[in-house]
Amino acid sequence: MWKNVGRSAFWFGSGSMLFVSSSFSKDVNFRHVQLLLPIKILCHFGVVTLVLAFFKDSIPQRQNTEQVRSFQLTEEDVLRVGRAVLPIANSLISMSRVIFSGDPSMTLKVFPILLFGAKYGHLFTVWRLLATGFFGCFTLPKLYSCYSSHIHEKVEGLNARILNAWKSCPRKKLVAAAAVTTFWNLVSVKTRVMAAFVSAVALRYHYQYGRSSRNSEGVIRRQEQQQAMVLED
């Protein structure tokens, strides 16, 4: 967040000079280094795993209590690599379990990123990832802290306009059916399958979290009524 301006400027300037000079270097071209990450393959595998985890979590279980399988690496498993790798590996495993848990909220967040990586993953190299992460760490948090309120206001205003336009539309079902039919006829089979999956996730998210929000509102109303009755007594 640029709390120490001198130190941040030094590291940012040094890193910028390194990346810019390597981009214009003719002797050593980092763009052709054969250290390519299989991002496209990993993202395709992640999409399949996410879909299977969602449908597995959607199937009702026979038992009410969920059996969570604990899977963590121990010191004996990574003794050859070193004890320093153990916390990193466990954090990655726990993070992957959270991401591929099948929860509709997490699925809606991760699925677009995996689709983008599966489509354009062949364009990413180690050097490009390092450059993007370097400049992103120095710029994105500061920009977000400065313009987050303005961005939220714009997004809320746009959502309000879309909802007002949709509520004022006299033929909602006809417009929705025409939009879905046009989209279904123009896109490919793969896009249709992905759209159907996203629709299923969105419906489950609306059913699950909408019902919980209604239950919480009912509890709050009952508490308010009880407080009012106590005050009247």
Image (tube, grey):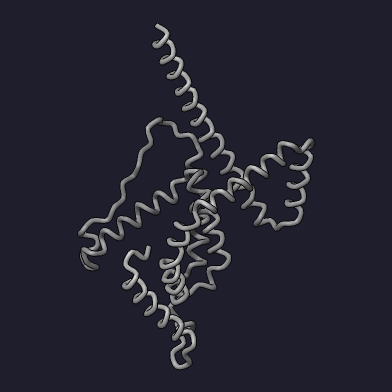
Residue nearest the viewer, comparing 75 with 202: 202
Which quadrant of the view contains residue 219? top left
Q: Residue furthest top?
A: 233
Q: Point out residue 50 in the picture as x, y percentages from the top left corner.
A: 50, 51
Q: Residue at x 30, y 56 (%)?
A: 90
Classify 177 as above or below 87: above
The residue sitting at 35% across, 75% down in the picture is 11
Residue 226: x %, y % from top left: 42, 14
Does residue 103 lie above or below 42 as drawn? above
Q: What percent of the width, then of the height, locates residue 27?
A: 45, 93
Q: Position of residue 126 (x, y in %)?
A: 44, 75
Q: To which quarter of the image does residue 130 belong?
A: bottom left
Residue at 78% across / 45% down in the picture? 178
The residue furthest bottom is: 27
Left or right side of 163 for 175? right
Q: Quadrant of the C terminus?
A: top left
Up-down: is 1 above or below 20?
Answer: above
For the point 75% across and 47% down, which residue is it? 179
Considering the image in quadrants, where does the N terminus appear?
bottom left
